Amino acid sequence: MSKIAYNIRYLRELKKLSQEGLAEDLKITRARLGAYEEARNEPPIEMLIRLSEYFKISVDALIKADLRKTDVNALMKIGDNRLLFPVILDKDNNDRIEVITAKASAGYLNGYADPEYIEKMPFMELPFNVTGKHRAFPVKGDSMPPLATGDFVIGKYVESLKEVLDGKTYVLLTKSEGIVYKRIYKKPGFVVELHSDNKSYQPYVINAYDILEIWEFVCCLKTSDRKKDEINMEHIVNLLLSMKVELEQLKKNDGKNEKKLIIRK
């Protein structure tokens, strides 16, 4: 049986509604509702939206999650809808901060909306009080110095792109790249330009519709004790390598006999 079927029945029973009562509220027949709950028919998108608005649960949650295994009242409430963020409290009723490990990050794009996946993540606490939903994400590569592979960024969930401030850093979950940490600039046409602090990486543009989650930088956890001069030297080498590629491309395009730039590490 599909998760949608389980979820409709579960949510109806949570509200202590009969099939007849819910069908009347949704303006459909009891037989049609019964077909949804027994998985004999799949509700069309219009009905999913109506169910989402009725139960104050996101369509994403209705489709992807088995809500029977989740405390629906503990899901994070954003605006008028509860989103698929299980808010797990510790013994002191403080919100736990899930840590998306480097190994788990590969599956985050598929599991971010699954409470069972999120609840399996390790968690941490911050030494200061925070408000809102927070999560820790792994850093990959050297595009955002001084952070590098192995470090973590702790971000606060941002409800809408409207709340994003140009020039600040955010962790994004995108359909095409998964988890990325960049400095963001909003551009006309509902697109976003992503900048790396390491200037050897060129800015690039993504469609805002490609963004699934936005997390604003709050703090970071460094796991490396690399010296500043080591980071700077790495940055210089990357810049020189980038210059080499550009010079060789110019030579290829112009047909000139420039001298090759030889770089030895």
Image: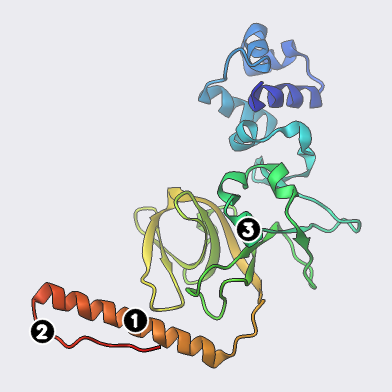
In the rendered image, the residue lying farthest to the right is 91
Where does residue 125 sit, x and y in percent of width and height?
Answer: 79, 66
Where does residue 217 sit, x and y in percent of width and height?
Answer: 60, 68
Looking at the image, do the residues carrying marks 2 and 1 touch, with CB atoms under 8 Å apart? no
Residue type at mark 1: give it: Leu
**Mark 2 or 1 closer to N-term?**
1
Seen at 62% across and 10% down, the residue is 32
- Residue 114 image-quadrant placement: top right
Where does residue 221 sit, x and y in percent of width and height?
Answer: 68, 74
What is the crowding at mark 1: few (fewer than 14 residues within 10 Å), some, or many (at least 20)? Answer: some
- The way the protein has been coloured in the rendering is rainbow
In the image, 40 versus 248, the foreground residue is 248
Residue type at mark 3: give it: Lys
Residue type at mark 2: give it: Asn
- State the SS at label 2: loop
- Relative to 168, say whether 232 is above or below: below
- State the SS at label 1: helix
**Mark 3 or 1 closer to N-term?**
3
Residue on which disc 2 sits: 257
Q: CA distance from mark 2 to mark 1?
A: 19 Å
What is the crowding at mark 3: few (fewer than 14 residues within 10 Å), some, or many (at least 20)? Answer: few
- Residue 122 image-quadrant placement: bottom right
What is the crowding at mark 2: few (fewer than 14 residues within 10 Å), some, or many (at least 20)? Answer: few
- Relative to 82, say whether 261 is above or below: below
Residue on which disc 1 sits: 241
Q: CA distance from mark 3 to mark 1?
A: 30 Å
Residue on which disc 3 sits: 103
Which quadrant of the figure contains the N terminus? top right
Q: CA distance from mark 3 to mark 2?
A: 47 Å
